[in-house]
């Protein structure tokens, strides 16, 4: 099955639909089908890959334990599009929604926003980003230790 993301005027994904491969023999055929189906000749659609995430193509033979596929040339458009994702023409890919934190940095190879300080793996979960402190904190506001 082929997947397509509908974009609004700001290149934000508003819908993701599935089209049979017999209909969507390529991206252009799938887009033409969707424009006709929805009677929206000016709608903007982009094909997206269900198996692509963080710039890598994944094998979901075991859905509980996906593994990186041996053929990474199959990675397509950075991420499988979701509602709220943004299409970036310059990257030819879908990026995660922009975080509320201005300090976070877009990794253009994965389409994922990263905190400027990595989260340290500790017994105590420091999982809340504190923009003012520019660091991760726990549920009580304690800053994570340095690595």
Image (cartoon, rainbow, N blue to C red):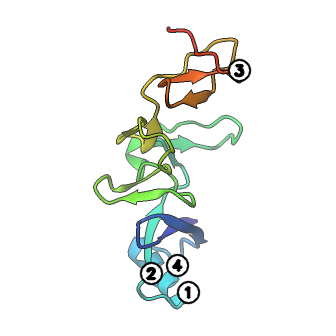
Mark 4 lies on a secondary structure that is loop
Q: Nearer the viewer, residue 131 or 15?
A: 131
Mark 2 lies on residue: 43
Q: Nearer the viewer, residue 131 or 22?
A: 131
Mark 2 lies on a secondary structure that is loop
User: How far, Cα to Cα, is label 4 from label 3?
Assistant: 54 Å
Q: Is residue 31 left or right of residue 89?
A: right
Residue 48 visible in the displayed image: yes
Upstream in the sequence, badge 4 or badge 2?
4
Upstream in the sequence, badge 2 or badge 1?
1
**How many badges with numbers are in the image?**
4
Mark 3 lies on a secondary structure that is loop
Mark 4 lies on residue: 23
Which disc is residue 113 wearing? none
Upstream in the sequence, badge 4 or badge 3?
4
Mark 1 lies on residue: 38
Which image quadrant: the N terminus? bottom right
Q: Are marks 2 and 1 in contact (CB under 8 Å)?
A: yes
Neighbourhood count class around disc 3 (C-alpha, 10 Å): few under 14, some 14–19, many 20 upward: few
Return the x and y of residue 142 as percentages of the image width and height.
63, 16
Mark 1 lies on a secondary structure that is loop
Mark 3 lies on residue: 140
User: How far, Cα to Cα, is label 4 from label 2?
Assistant: 18 Å
Q: Nearer the viewer, mark 4 or mark 1?
A: 1
Q: Is residue 142 left or right of residue 88?
A: right
């Amino acid at each position: 099955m082929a997947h397509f993301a509908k974009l609004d005027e700001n290149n934000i994904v508003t819908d993701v639909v599935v089209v049979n491969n017999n209909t969507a023999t390529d991206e252009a055929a799938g887009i033409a089908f969707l424009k006709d189906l929805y009677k929206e000749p000016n709608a903007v659609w982009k094909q997206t890959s269900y198996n692509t995430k963080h710039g890598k193509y994944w094998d979901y033979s075991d859905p509980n334990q996906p593994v990186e596929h041996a053929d990474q040339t199959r990675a397509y458009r950075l991420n499988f599009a979701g509602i709220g994702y943004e299409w970036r023409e310059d990257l030819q890919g879908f990026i995660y929604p922009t975080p509320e934190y201005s300090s976070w940095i877009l990794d253009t190879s994965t389409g994922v926003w990263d905190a400027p300080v990595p989260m340290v793996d500790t017994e105590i979960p420091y999982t809340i980003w504190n923009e003012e402190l520019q660091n991760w904190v726990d549920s009580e506001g304690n800053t994570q230790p340095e690595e």
